[in-house]
Amino acid sequence: MSFDHLNRREFVTLLGGAAALAQLTAHAQESGRIYRIGGLHQSPHDAPQHLAFFAELQKLGFIEGQNLAVDRRGYGQAVERFAELAQDQVKVQLDAIICGGEAAARAVQQATATIPLIVLVDDAIRAGLVRSLAKPGGNTTGVSILATELDGKRQKILMEAVPGLRHMAALVDPGSTTIPQTQALRGAARVRGVELSIYELTKREDLAPAIDAAKASGAAALNVLASALFFNNRQIVFERVAALRLPAIYQWPEMAEQEGLLGYGPRLVQLYRDVMSRQVVKVLRGTKPADIPVEQPTRFELVINLKTARAFGLEMPTSILLRATQVIE
């Protein structure tokens, strides 16, 4: 539509929208302030989700090297160092700290009750990180990824993907999955005539031995439950299950786009880029975390990697292929 054909109402609407955008951008950069944010993550600062997050912040007017300073000391770190690093970040009085996983969120919560935290965790309510999703209270908000429900859905998908399955295993991070959750998974498997063995671990070096033990026990499939530990050490899991030809399902679709067989859930990159970046911007513009609702994923994808399936000698049932969001040939 040309300018000549705009009526008065359309012109005022466009003018008002442009003015609002300019006002928001100016507010984000007013008075020459330098905003300082940090993070606590097992994943490195150049992981895809973090690159997408900072690229979105730039679009929203927060540009590193101009009006944004980023403390990267907390990226790519072992869980054992989280408490120490949380204290270090609190000392430099950051404007916000972004946390990936429950262990990181707990470490920072224990270090400060005032600096805003934006977290991505499996279940923010169960972990006691917020009072409620709608009114989180305190200094924490972020994303709660419905891990309890999704772990069960992934178990059903895996059972369907491996016809005739009678014994399966699950890798469990007790910091992310509770005993009642594992009991519920066992009960659901039992109803379908499947035995479920649970392997709990909290350290990177225990991953390969746990997978070996699952295979030795007779498990013919593996449910890798929601956990920052498992995701950030996924290459170990990929290599071990490939060596054992053990079909496995993972919490993020992106994992099946790498070497995983199946991935079901929301996209990690999308949550950082579209949700957490927006929450951080609200905090930097003055909104208290207590007044920013914790969000949950609304889009879920099933990705199937047929290349991995062929390497495992597994023929994927047509019923599950028809439900896939993406099939990698």
Image: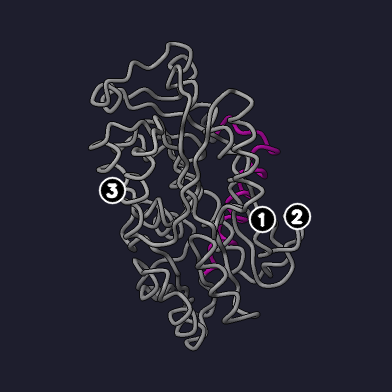
Query: Looking at numbered disc 1 in the image, what kind of residue is underneath it?
Result: Val
Contact between labelled residues 1 and 3, with CB atoms less than 8 Å apart: no
Secondary structure beneath dot 2 equals loop
C-alpha gap between disc 3 and disc 2: 36 Å
Which residue position holds label 2?
134
225 in relation to 157, above or below = below
Name the residue: 47% across, 73% down: 37
Task: Residue 62 in the image: state x and y as whole percent.
Answer: 46, 65
Q: Quadrant of residue 95?
A: bottom right
Q: Nearer the viewer, mark 3 or mark 2?
A: 3
Q: Which residues are magenta?
A: 4-28
- Looking at the picture, how far across and down is residue 34, in whole percent? 46, 79
The residue tagged 3 is: 235
- In the drawing, does residue 68 fall left or right of residue 120? left
Report, in whole angstroms, how far the alpha carbon at label 3 lies from the one at label 1. Answer: 30 Å
Say which residue appears at 36% left-offset and 76% top-offset.
Answer: 73
**In this view of the protein, which residue sits in the foreground, 123 or 218?**
218
Q: Amino acid at mark 3?
A: Gln
Secondary element at image label 1: loop
Q: Which residue is mark 1?
A: 294
- Please identify the quadrant where the C terminus is shown: top left
- The amino acid pointed to by label 2 is Ala
Sort mark 3 into few (<14), some (14-19) or many (20+) by Cα contacts within 10 Å: some
Earlier residue among tags 2 and 1: 2
Q: Is residue 151 above or below residue 133?
A: above
| Distance Cα–Cα, label 2 vs label 1 | 6 Å
Secondary-structure class at tag 3: helix
| Residue 107 among magenta residues | no
